[in-house]
Image (cartoon, helix red, strand yellow):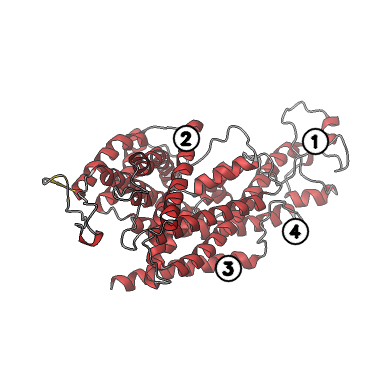
Amino acid sequence: MAGDITETGSLYSPFMGLIYIFNLIVGTGALTMPKAFRAAGWLISLVLIILLGFFSFMTTTFVVETMSVANARLRWKTREKQNERVHGPPYSYYERMKKDDAHTEDVIEDEEENQSEEERRALLAPVNDPKRRRVDLYDITERVEMGQMASMFFNKIGWYLFYLCIVIYLYGDLAIYAAAVPKSLRDITCPVNITCNIKPSKQINLTNSSPCWGTAVNRQNAYRVYLGAFSLLLGPFVFFNVQKTKYLQLLTSLMRWVAFTIMIILAMTRITHGKGEGHPKMESITSVPNLFGVCVYSFMCQHSLPSLVTPIKNKRHLSLLVFFDFLVILVFYLVLSFTGIFCFNNKDIKDIYTLNFMDKCDPITSAKEISYFLGLFPVFTLSTNFPIIAITLRNNLKTLFHRDGYTYPWIIDRIFFPLLTIVPPIAVAFGTDDLEFLVGVTGSYAGAGIQYLVPAFLVYSARKEQRILFGPGSINKHTSPFRHTFWVYFVWIWGTLSIIFVTVNHILTKS
């Protein structure tokens, strides 16, 4: 998901912005959600996903507000540099307005040195002056990534913690992708001898030691062969710089919509024909930690919001549009997961949901073209994202260890950091192919930090600096609907308690 970033060279409509955000959020996590729903029970799953969707929307508005304050701060610095020759040593924006008795909105001035005094007076004219060329102080016109916002509003310790959190999350993301693609290829290409007239209970249960391409190669070794090939084919991209093209993103987005729509229709068809085999339980508290991690991972978008929100042309009703997007995504997840847990036998739901639609004995899902399309869907979409995420992680690692005035030697810059990026997640994928576990752990810890704690700390620090620079009466049109400080504290407490609960539950489960 971290790699699903749109090009920002041109502006687009709010509707297109919502589509980009939808495509960013709905990814790998959705493929693991039905199994997590089945394990935790439909009632707990329903309550938890609504709650986590609400919190994710809240922190999304926190990030947007922080972006607007960051833009205002950059705009203020530009103005101070331009006005220093006129007013002397710079004041804060708030002090400047008091000193000049000019309670006006911020403006964008021409940067040319030969600007005339008449033009300068027009730029600083009152709000109702028709000659005034102005831009709202808090307009989001410049893309400010989360790392840059962390540099603006965090101290050194907070800055390190932020980068540590994002690096761990990206490592987990790469491990998930590295396991999902070979696992899908293994399950597609390994022949399974199933006799359609024999009851499923009497069929041979597949394990990692079951034969795949013959007695010498079992399913576990086949997975590792595919993982090795995946590493050799896509791993080298981390040594270079690549950029996702707009057309590739549109293609993967189209495949995503088609694949999920097909799965929902096929599952609903089986249920309406009386062939639904699922009898999900209401609750299972021991499975909540994995469900929590899956849901957090499935609503992740905060780290890529600057790339998606900044190019939107009209941001007047941005919070309302984002709320609508989250509502659509929530309904989509519920439909996908509930049709899955009522369609398939509780024991048969795969951790990659697309693999459930490869039953050659089921007349509804046995179409070979549909089976192969759904089976290869994760392979194509995740493979195109893998190099982007790897390069993002590599650059974040360089930033994390960088020192002012220091230049990395060639071997460190071009060899060590790429290897440091690609080797750990590949090693994890060689150790386990349990996607539900990988998604659960990544979402529960690093994901919770990025989705809850980081946005809450960012907006708290941004609001504090906003009051210092622009005065307590400054109005930010992109202020979150959750503007009261109570919500910031609430998110801090919720995120901390969630991580503690998940940790304790994992310990108790394993003991």
Mark number displayed over residue 472? 4
Q: Secondary structure at mark 4?
A: loop
Q: Neighbour class for label 3 at 10 Å: few (<14), some, many (≥20)?
A: few
Pointer 3 or 4: first along the chain: 4
Q: Amino acid at mark 2?
A: Leu
Q: Neighbour class for label 1 at 10 Å: few (<14), some, many (≥20)?
A: some
Mark toward the viewer: 1 or 3: 3
State the residue at coordinates (42%, 60%).
293
Residue 340, how many percent across, how many down? 41, 57
> Which quadrant of the view contains residue 39?
bottom left
Task: Tell me, yes or no, whether the two marked residues, 3 and 4, touch with CB atoms within 8 Å.
Answer: no
Residue 449, how many percent across, how many down? 48, 59
Mark toward the viewer: 2 or 3: 2
Pointer 2 or 4: first along the chain: 2
Residue 347 sits above or below residue 112 on the image? below
Q: Secondary structure at mark 2?
A: helix
- Mark 1 lies on residue: 133
Query: Relative to residue 12, is residue 357 drawn left or right?
Result: left
Query: Relative to residue 41, is residue 204 drawn left or right?
Result: left
Residue found at the far right of this picture: 129
Q: Amino acid at mark 3?
A: Phe
Q: CA distance from mark 1 to mark 4?
A: 25 Å
Decide which of 463, 214 is in the foreground and name it: 214
- Mark 2 lies on residue: 251
Q: Secondary structure at mark 3?
A: helix
